[in-house]
Image (cartoon, helix red, strand yellow):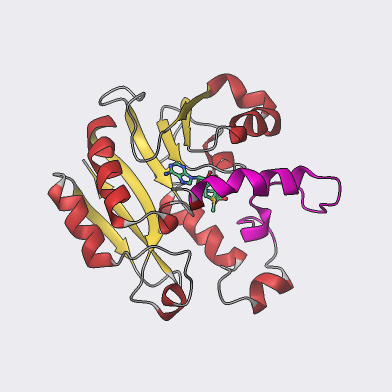
Amino acid sequence: MKWNRRWSKGLKAVLGSESRQKYFGDQWGIPDSETTFFQRINPLRITSEKLAQVVETYIEPYVTPNSVVLEIGSGGGRWTKYFLNAKETTVVELNPEFFTYLRDRFDGSASRFRFYTTTGYELDGIPTESVDFLFTFGTFVHIEPEGIRSYMAHIKRVLKKGAIGVIHYSNKKRIRAKLNPSFSRMNPSMMESLVYQNGLKVIQHDAKLLNHSSIVVLQK
Ligand SMILES: C[S@@+](CC[C@H](N)C(=O)[O-])C[C@H]1O[C@@H](n2cnc3c(N)ncnc32)[C@H](O)[C@@H]1O
């Protein structure tokens, strides 16, 4: 938990006058731009082509102008920007400093944003059966199984019947996750257990697209 609080310091660095980066999150790659030299040579970075596939496969099919979206761990909005056409997007963050940042960045859509500061692994402020699409990327990779277990019960509660969730998480079966101490000790079979234990279904499970992490698509 303490480790996950550190992101707001990163935000200050990005906003500082020394920074040449446009938005917080660009340092991890931008889905709709060219892969940078740094992304290409750093084995812990994902190419922009792969990030674009995440958008095409795991966001676009599920988000419509009628969707109520919930994003956990938005950071600077690297993925939030793909929810701007949704009916409503609730952003859940451990570090609420990002809320002001998102309001400024997506000024024209801010009226359709809702914000919830979690104490860690809960969604107590989100109404039951209110969400059509849940998305989290780059956040659960740093959350240990106990935290994901807690979140999963809340996810089950807040999703509408038939609603979809897309969760990107650490896969310690892959060498690049093993080499990264900031990645949590998760793997695909642990994730499937957590999904099924909460009465949710796995409808797609991708352990190949990314070299240190996996993406599960679940349904209530
Ligand atoms: C690595 S950043 C990723 C941000 C964004 N999803 C992206 O891909 O650019 C992780 C984000 O998750 C947030 N976070 C960390 N732990 C969290 C938790 N338990 N619940 C919600 N958000 C959390 C951090 O504040 C940070 O904004």
Measured from the top left, where is residue 114 in percent x and y? 49, 23
Q: Residue at x 57, y 77 (%)?
A: 43
Q: Per the image, is 85 magenta? A: no
Choose between 131 and 9: the one closer to the eye.
Answer: 9
Q: Residue at x 54, y 37 (%)?
A: 95
Q: Residue at x 42, y 33 (%)?
A: 118
Q: Residue at x 48, y 57 (%)?
A: 54
Q: Is residue 45 above or below residue 143?
A: below
In the orientation shown, which residue stands out farthest toward the right? Answer: 17
Q: Is residue 206 above or below residue 115?
A: below
Number of dots carrying numbers: 0
In the orientation shown, which residue stands out farthest toward the top? Answer: 111
Q: Is residue 136 above or below residue 49?
A: above
Is residue 36 among what the camera can see? yes
Left-right relation of 203 to 216? left
Corner quadrant of residue 27: bottom right
Residue stretch rendered in magenta on the structure: 4-33
Corner quadrant of residue 34: bottom right
Left-right relation of 22 to 101? right
Question: Which of the image's four quarters has the C terminus?
Answer: top left
Choose between 206 and 147: the one closer to the eye.
Answer: 147
Choose between 51 and 139: the one closer to the eye.
Answer: 139
Q: Is residue 76 above or below residue 96?
A: below
Q: Per the image, is 19 magenta? A: yes
Left-right relation of 216 to 76? left
